[in-house]
């Protein structure tokens, strides 16, 4: 015969070899968890907290990209009345709100106390 029979090698029973094979997979999962999954969960938790605390006068962004001012929050329902233009009000489901816009102060070169006296 031209082909010699192949014999299976005996298993060494080395658990260290098996552990080192799975170690890179465990490390990759840990990196993904701490760099991608955990920050996203934190961001979602913060958004849920902001949406639950919406009150009249807050500026919000909807999933459709519409920015408006909250006019009325209906307790017991999932709807919020948002004014998107002067005298144009729409009903928005809370779950479609993707952000609450916080007003930002202007970047003045002087602090406010110095600007008033100067």
Image (cartoon, helix red, strand yellow):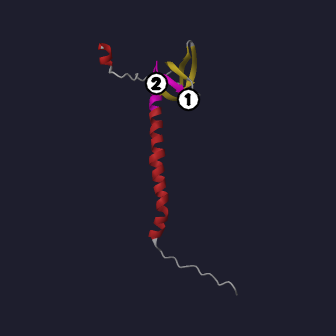
Q: Disc number at residue 96?
A: 1
User: In what element is the residue under mark 1?
Assistant: helix
- Whether residue 115 can be seen here: yes
User: In what element is the residue under mark 2?
Assistant: loop
| In the depicted structure, whether residue 47 falls above or below residue 25 | above
Marks 1 and 2 sit apart, C-alpha to C-alpha, by 13 Å
Of all residues shown, which one is farthest toward the right?
Answer: 1
Which quarter shows the C terminus? top left
Q: Position of residue 94 (x, y in %)?
A: 53, 27
Which quarter shows the N terminus? bottom right
The residue wearing badge 2 is 54
Q: Position of residue 74 (x, y in %)?
A: 51, 21
Q: Is residue 59 on the magenta stretch?
A: yes
For mark 2, does the 10 Å Cα neighbourhood hold few (<14), some (14 to 19), or many (20 or more) residues?
some
Q: Earlier in the sequence, mark 1 or mark 2?
A: 2
For mark 1, does the 10 Å Cα neighbourhood hold few (<14), some (14 to 19), or many (20 or more) residues?
some
Q: Position of residue 93 (x, y in %)?
A: 56, 26
Please give the range of residues in magenta: 48-61
Identify which residue is drawn at 45% across, 52% down: 30
């Amino acid at each position: 015969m031209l082909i010699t029979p192949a014999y299976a090698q005996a298993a060494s029973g080395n658990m260290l070899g098996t552990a080192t094979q799975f170690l890179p997979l465990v490390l990759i999962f840990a990196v993904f968890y701490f760099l991608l999954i955990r920050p996203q969960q934190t961001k979602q938790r913060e958004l849920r907290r902001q949406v639950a605390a919406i009150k009249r006068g807050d500026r919000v962004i909807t999933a459709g990209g519409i920015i408006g001012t909250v006019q009325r929050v209906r307790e017991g329902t999932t709807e919020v009345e948002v004014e998107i233009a002067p005298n144009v009000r729409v009903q928005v489901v809370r779950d479609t709100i993707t952000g609450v816009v916080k007003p930002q102060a202007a970047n003045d070169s002087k602090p406010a106390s110095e600007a008033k006296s100067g």
